[in-house]
Structure formats: C-alpha cells, structure tokens
Amino acid sequence: MANAAHLEQLGSGCESWNQWREAHPAAAIDLSHAHLARADLSGFNLSGVRLISTNLKYANLSGANLRSANLFDVNLSHANLVNANLANANLISSVLDSAQLDTADLGFAKLTGAQLDHASCEGTDFQKANLSQASLRHTNLSQANLAGANLWSANLKGACLYQATLSSNSNLTAVIWGETVMPNGQVDDLALLLG
C-alpha cells in the first residue's frame, strides 16, 4: 500500500517533490495501489519508486523520470509519457493502451505481457527492452529503436514499423505479424515472408 506521507509529499507539487527527493536520495518511496488517475506528474522524479498496481490512467507523466521504477501491473492507458525516462523500469503486465510514449526512453525496460495496443511510440527507445508476449496491435512504432529488443511472441498485428530500427539480435521468434507497415514503408504480411 502507498505510504501516506509519500502521497502527501507528492501532492505538494513537482518542484517541492523533486527537492525532497534530492534531499532524501536513499528513501524507499512506495506509491503502490494509489489512485493517481489524471494526475499531473510531468517532470516529477519518480526514479526507483514502487508504483505496483497504481492507477495512472490518463495521467500526465511527460518528461517524468521513472528510471528503474517498479510499475508492475500498472494502468497507464491513455497516459502521456512523451519524453519520459523509463529505462530499466519494470512494466510487466502493465496496461499502456493508447498511451503517448513518443521519444520516451524504455531501454532495457521489462514489458513482458504489457498491453500497448494503439499506443503512440514514435521515436521511442526500446533498445534491449523485453517485450516478450506484449501486445502492440496497431501501435505506432515508426522511428522506434528496437535494436536488441526481445519481441518473442509479441503481437504486432497492424503495427507501424516505418523507419524503425531492428537489429540482428532483435528476437523476432514467434511474433504475430499480420498486416504490418514495415521499415521501408511497405505494407507486408510478415507471416508469409518469414513463415
């Protein structure tokens, strides 16, 4: 459960919160199970924070620092995460449907089983992220960096990969493709190409 003192401090605003975090760098922050739907957390330093099963639906997290945060089973659907830092974050089983993740840093993030259907991930860095069994149906991944990403058994049906970066060490085993817009801008059924 969320620590009441931490929730109260969070409500003091971005500048006060970030100053408090700077003054207490070793504090173990727990905001788990909090109801933060539609909260404006843009620019907040939430690095390393426990946000397990927190409701962040429609929240504004643009430019927030969520590096190494534990976001297991979090509802981030329709959230704004543009330019957010989610490197090394745990997003296993989280819901990010229709979230705005353009240019966010999700390098090395754990997104196993996450739902990113209809999300906007244009220019997002997924380098070496674990997207195994994630649902990315109709997701905009144009110009996304998927180099070294684990996409084992991910659902990319209808996703746009226009100018996306895939590398030889990107794991594409058992990916569900369907009709997908490829890096060259062509629409292809990769199931036929790779099958």
Image: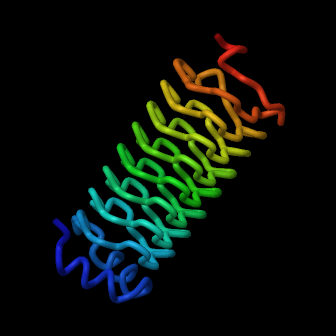
**Residue furthest out toward the top:** 195
Residue 144 in the figure: left or right of residue 182? left
Report the residue at 66% width, 39% height from top: 159
**Is 13 located above or below residue 132 in the figure?**
below
Image coloring type: rainbow
Report the residue at 17% width, 78% height from top: 4
- From the viewer's side, name the closer residue of 179 and 182: 179
Residue 134 in the figure: left or right of residue 168? left
Q: Quadrant of residue 112?
A: top left
Residue 116 in the figure: left or right of residue 28? right
Report the residue at 83% width, 36% height from top: 185
Position in image of residue 133 (x %, y %): 44, 31
Position in image of residue 77 (x %, y %): 46, 59
- From the viewer's side, name the closer residue of 70 and 58: 58
Residue 35 in the figure: left or right of residue 84? left
Position in image of residue 74 (x %, y %): 35, 56
Position in image of residue 195 (x %, y %): 64, 10
